Amino acid sequence: MTNHHIALIPGDGIGAEVLPPAQQVLDAVGARHGFGFSYTSYDWSCERYVREGAMMPEDGLDHLRTKDAILLGAVGHPGVPDHVSLWGLLIPIRRSFRQYVNLRPIRVFEGVDSPLRAAAPGEVDFVVVRENVEGEYSEIGGRLNRGLPEEMAVQEAVFTRSGVTRVLDYAFELAARRGGRLTSATKSNGIVHTMPFWDELVAERGADHPQVTWDQEHIDALAAKFVLEPARFDVVVASNLFGDILSDLAAAVAGSIGIAPAANLNPERTFPSMFEPVHGSAPDIAGRGIANPIGAIWSAALLLDHLGRGEAARDVTDAIAAVLAKTDLRTPDLGGNATTTEFTEGLLGLL
Ligand code: NAI
Ligand code: MG
């Protein structure tokens, strides 16, 4: 029985080690709830780039367009510049498929030590909503006078009313469904055009969501508060660059980057959305079978939620919490000595 057709892009390094566990979890939880998956796997990666000169084929996006969702491991390989893997695969997918919300949940699980004294298990549970297709990561700009003393570089940030409004609406609606609190990341004291515009739109959208209490913090102060008081946050909304930095910081707060999941969402569902762990291909541990699969498995839970399988999604996050709280199974990044396979088996046993 196939209800959902998933495109798998394992990518490089540990990407290919953490996707099979996520797939096993999807199949197991689907069987329990009476639905199934079929998968089409693509070898798009830096390895392919080295072999064929491109991360994906020219008609790559057409392959993905018809799928219900995309599950990606990680891309990146020593020797291939990181902008190649980013601009040759991830950014075309995010932009062409209007995945303008980058959703990154953060939790400190019982049984996992956060590096922060203030981060008690169970108390830290928030979501970073990052604008994913415009803002500071734009292609507008250029370089002049290369190699000369007057050499210069200009990079323009692009903030549009429609682009900011739609991600803010997503964040406010998410806050309304969660704890009812939203924090906006800004820097309108230093960045005097785009950030005041962002702030105005936050106030405008806030007025339309009276059930949500919102505030705003300058990005530098906000970074400090992530460390000092991580339990005070519920939904944090940020531009592309600010959200990128905040979500990696937040993943570290949760104890290991190997835990953190991400969803690249096209909320209108005109195009497939993409789910991927926050971590990269981890060449330092690749091939040893010790990668933490939680980030990929939690990403699969976000995929389930997006496909309208909320109960199954909750089963998966409950199983992650249970294996950490009730067993000693830990991969080495969390201080244990379980392999990826042993950890996955333990989690499947509690699903
Ligand atoms: P990374 O996330 O791959 O690794 C950072 C550190 O965390 C390493 O020590 C690694 O061993 C550890 N780590 C990461 N994931 C882990 C897991 N699941 N279990 C246990 N330990 C884990 O970031 P790094 O080293 O900066 O980048 C390596 C490559 O990955 C680069 O080529 C980079 O461009 C790429 N990358 C790709 C991303 C993506 O595909 N979305 C995101 C981030 C990096
Ligand atoms: Mg990042």
Image: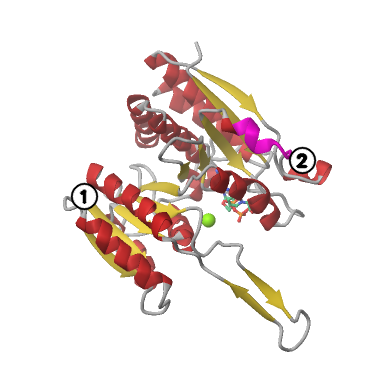
Disc 1: CA contacts within 10 A as few (<14), some (14-19) or many (>=20): some
Q: Is mark 2 within 8 Å of ligand 1?
A: no
The amino acid marked with disc number 2 is Arg
* Of residues 77 and 163, the one drawn nearer to the viewer in this rendering: 163
Q: Residue furthest bottom?
A: 149
Left or right side of 316 for 181 = left
* Of residues 258 and 170, the one drawn nearer to the viewer in this rendering: 170
Task: Tell me: residue 296, above or below residue 252.
Answer: above
Q: Residue at x 55, y 46 (%)?
A: 94
Q: Residue at x 50, y 10 (%)?
A: 1
Question: Which mark, by number, is residue 48?
Answer: 2
Q: Residue furthest right?
A: 51
Query: Quick check: is 63 in the magenta stretch?
Result: yes
| Disc with the residue nearer the chain's start (2 vs 1) | 2
Provide residue 212's location: percent of width, then percent of height.
20, 52
Left or right side of 110 for 152 = right
Left or right side of 139 for 110 = left
Tell me where the magenta segment starts and ends, as one range: 57-64
Pointer 2 and pointer 1: residues touching (CB < 8 Å)?
A: no
The amino acid marked with disc number 1 is Gly
Task: Tell me: residue 168, above or below residue 260.
Answer: below
Left or right side of 282 for 321 = left
Disc 2: CA contacts within 10 A as few (<14), some (14-19) or many (>=20): some
Q: What kind of element bears circle 2?
A: helix
Question: Which mark, by number, is residue 180?
Answer: 1
Provide residue 289's location: percent of width, then percent of height.
63, 36
Question: Which mark, by number, is residue 328?
Answer: none
